[in-house]
Each structure stands twice: as structure tokens, then as C-alpha cells.
Amino acid sequence: MARSFDDLSEQEILALAIDSEEDDSRIYNEFAERLQESYPETARTLRVMRDEELGHAHRLMEIYRANFGDHLLFIRRQDVTGFITRKPLWLARLLTVDQVRKEVETMEYEAQHFYEAAGKRTSNISIRKLLNELALVEATHEEMAAGFENELTSSGHLGAEKETARRMFVLQFIQPGLAGLMDGSVSTLAPVFAAAFATRSSHDAFLVGMAASIGAGISMGFAEALSDDGKISGRGHPYIRGSVCGLMTTLGGVGHTLPFLIPGFGLAMAVAVAVVAVELAIISWIRHKYMDTPLLSATFQVVVGGVLVFLTGILIGSA
């Protein structure tokens, strides 16, 4: 079971900070190696950030030893609620500089919020001083990451305030909204179309679709709200994210349910199928625009998944 950040002791917070800095340094080094040939300046900056993260870990280790001895507690980000769940982007076959820039921005933004929250949790003056200093350093790293586009422009900054606002919009609204829309649009296909083909009744299909959509919306909304309190990740209030996710989940299912208000079964089915195609296209476009997924790849992933679920509903309903 993951621990709540509010339940961590000063010793656990420091151990977590050390592990996080060492982990981030390895990630930066891997990014630098992958980008060295095509983006040498970006790779150089990443190595500078790697070395600074190792320096932070060293400073944290010194103050940890001074206060708690040589035994370092084993605690990681995945052991504590509130951290952003990271997919291993550095293992992807194709890795663009824009993907790296956005990932680094997110990492530094999270690190800054972590140190700000950690500083408020400690009563030890020397520990609090160090944590606050590291929060300021991570803020400068965040600005550095914002300058990665166009291989670090001469200014090194590309409208940091706008970039921060965009990133927060993605974290607080786009990500939970997209997760909900995908779940609502895809997961409700099977029960809706199974009911439609089993009963040949637009009314019955409509009732099943509404029940599945609203139920999925409630479930996804609570799951998103309880997954992260936003204190460390900076993803905003959990109730807002949960509401966005829940509403988009419901909307995703209701979209292809409403056509079954049409009395004629054949016409209702044709309109519902057309709506499904539009839904999958919208999801692919959002993933391409905000999640840096190639359009062809995003379309293939979403369409294949949607078609498989759609066919499952038809086969079960026709059995």
C-alpha cells in the first residue's frame, strides 16, 4: 500500500528526496545519450542537469547522515501517493526532443512542488533551509527545460509563463479528460451494442448505454480523484480532476448512446456507428496534439482497440 505524503517522517522525506534525485539523474543521463547525435546542445544541458541532481543527492545525504546516521531508508516515489506516474519514455524506440523537453519540464515541476511541500513538513531548521534552497534550484531547472525547443534558443526561455500554464492545463484537464473520454467511448461499446443486437430494441440499448455511461463516469471520477491529492505533482485539486475525468467518461459513453433515442433500429444503429467513428477520431487527434503521439500511431491504437470492443459487443449480442 502506498503511503500518504502527510504521514512521512522527516527521515523518510529526506530518504525519498535522495532516491528521487538519484533516479532523475539517471533519467537525464539516458535522455542525453539518446539525443547526443541529433541535439548535442540539448544533450549537454541534460548532462549539466544530471550532475546538479547528483550534487543535490550528495547534499541531502550529508544532512541525512548528520541527523539520522548511515542507514538510508528504502523508500521510492512509487511508495508514496501524489507523484506523477511516469511511463518509461526513455525506452521508446523513437524519442523526439519535444517529448524529452515536456517530460523534463514535468519532472522539474514535480520536484519543485515536492521540496516546497517537504520544507513545510520539517521543524529542523537546517533541513528546511536545504529543502527550500533545492525548491528554488528546481524552479530554475524548470525554466531551463522550457528552453529546449528549437535546440535551446539564444534566450533559453520560450515564454516560461505560457509554457507553465499550458503544462498545467494538460496535467489538470487534458490528461484526466482524455483518460475519461477513452474509457467512456471504448469500454461502453460492448454493452451498448451487445444489448442492441440481442434485443433489436433502440429503447433497451439506450437504457443499457446510459446505465453503463453514468456508472463508468462515477467509477472513473472517484478513481482519478483518489489517485493523487496534487500536493506534490501540482496537478491541481483532486475533485476538479475527478470531475473532469468523470464527466468526460460519461460523455464518451453517452455520445453513441443518444442515437438509440431514434425509434427505428436500423437508422439508430447507423447513426451510432457514425458517432463511434467520430469519437475515435477525436480521441486520436487529442492524443496527437497534447500527448505527443504520432497521428498515425494514435489513430491505429485507438481504432484497433475500439473496433475490437465493438466487434465483441456485436458477437456477444448476436449469440
Image (cartoon, rainbow, N blue to C red):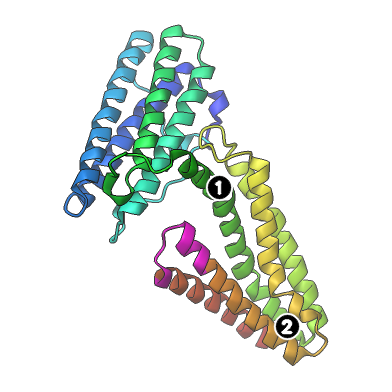
Secondary structure state at the residue bearing disc 2? helix
Viewer can see residue 84? no
Instruction: Report if residue 286 lies within the magenta region.
Output: yes
Three-letter code, disc 2: Ala
N-terminal label among 1 and 2: 1
In the displayed structure image, the side of residue 112 where residue 175 appears, left or right: right
Q: Residue at x 73, y 74 (%)?
A: 257
Q: Is residue 131 visible?
A: yes
Front-most of 274 and 208? Answer: 274
What residue is disc 2 on? 196
Q: Quick one: which residue is furthest to the front in this view?
A: 154
Q: Main secondary structure of the magenta part?
A: helix
Residue 211 in picture, x, y percent from top left: 77, 66
Bounds of the magenta segment: 284-296
* Residue 293: quadrant of the picture: bottom left
Residue drawn at the location 21% of the way across and 44% of the way down: 41
Q: Is residue 16 above or below residue 161?
A: above
Q: In which quarter of the image is residue 288?
A: bottom left
Residue 300 position within the rendered picture, expressed as x and y whole percent measured from the top left? 44, 74
Residue 169's tag is 1
Q: Where is residue 167 in the image (x, y as percent from the top left)?
A: 49, 46
Mark 1 or mark 2, which is nearer to you?
A: 1
User: For residue 66: magenta?
Assistant: no
Quadrant position of the C terminus in the picture: bottom right
Query: Which kind of residue does numbered mark 1 sit on?
Result: Phe
> Under tag 1, what secondary structure?
helix
Give the vertical position of 142 relative to 41 (above or below): above
**Label 1 packing within 10 angstroms: few (<14), some (14-19), many (20+):** some
